Amino acid sequence: MRELSGRIAVVTGAASGIGLAIAREFADAGARVVIADIAAEAATAAAHDITTEGGTAIGLPVDVASRPAVERLFANAEAAYGPVDILVNNAGISIDAGIRRLTDEQWQRTLTINQTGVFLCSQTAARSMIPRRTGRIINIASRAWLGWFGQTAYASSKGGVVSATRSLAIELARHGITVNCLAPGLIDTPLLRREPAETLDRLMTAQPTGTLGAAEDVAWAARFFAGPASTAVTGQVLYVCGGKSLYAQPA
Ligand code: NAD
């Protein structure tokens, strides 16, 4: 018996990168996985790959910034598999714009997807988890919330995710629901590869490990928060960043 057998997991932004690795890891642990992404075709393709590998997954479209779309996602997930036990709020964007160039639109878009998206998905999931007195919510923040040069919008949005994790953990603990947060450092995914090569070199040199992490590193940590081994753990931020969070100075 695998530790997530019988569990239903929704992973947002799971058509690519970290979310896809988490979806794969959860399927390996026996969960039925909903790959929820704004890139609908890529979500379906990812679910097909996981199914071919022996897992159980479907792809469903969602824009996490839209309440009707989020409510539709959870209704469709429930219709396909049953009520959701595990939510991973992973969908996110990063806009590289220093404070002199950052526009209102960029600021708003970053907060709407990275932060409001976590609110909408967590609220919808919690409303279904509370009566069943069970649930796991795992938020993907970022080490950047501690500070990242030229990334005020992104870092602020992730700081909001850390803060939401802590408050939700307190509010939902009595209902048997844990809420935890992963703060990845530099992880080799399409999102990170959008950074200019010189920025990547500079960031990698500043890593204690000197290397990028892999999406699987984050997925293994997510599996811990989703499974029975973390029953008494809530409201925590687990850094998956090769030790970078130990440095006081920003990236
Ligand atoms: P990625 O770009 O590979 O994947 C992000 C996924 O989110 C994509 O499939 C995209 O289609 C989806 N998405 C974007 N907007 C969406 C929306 N509105 N609704 C639904 N889906 C949407 O990125 P990644 O590197 O895998 O990042 C995943 C998460 O990890 C993000 O929250 C990111 O901020 C965080 N993170 C990444 C790193 C890193 O180094 N890669 C570091 C720290 C935190």
Image (spheres, helix red, strand yellow):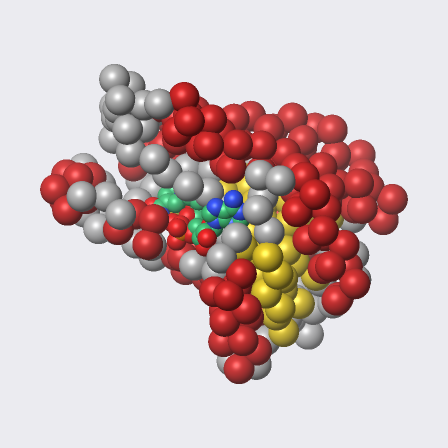
Where residue 24 sits: x, y (%)?
51, 67
Where residue 231 sits: x, y (%)?
68, 47
Q: Is residue 158 above or below residue 198?
A: above
Q: Nearer the viewer, residue 191 or 44?
A: 44
Q: Residue at x 23, y 43 (%)?
A: 195
Q: Is residue 83 above or below residue 29?
A: above
Counting the numbered discs, the total is: 0
Q: Residue at x 63, y 55 (%)?
A: 10
Q: Residue at x 32, y 28 (%)?
A: 151
Q: Quadrant of residue 102?
A: top left
Evaluate whether residue 165 shows in this view: no
Q: Is residue 112 above or below residue 33?
A: above
Task: Give the quarter of the figure containing the C terminus.
Answer: top left
Where residue 168 sits: x, y (%)?
67, 31
Q: Nearer the viewer, residue 185 or 198?
A: 198
Where residue 157 sits: x, y (%)?
46, 29
Evaluate whether residue 149 shows in this view: yes
Find the residue positioned furthest to the top: 100
Question: Quick check: 207 left or right of 229?
Answer: left
Question: Quick check: 21 left or right of 248?
Answer: right
Q: Residue at x 65, y 26 (%)?
A: 167
Q: Quadrant of residue 83?
A: bottom right
Task: Give the quarter of the figure containing the N terminus.
Answer: bottom right
Question: Quick check: 134 left or right of 58?
Answer: right
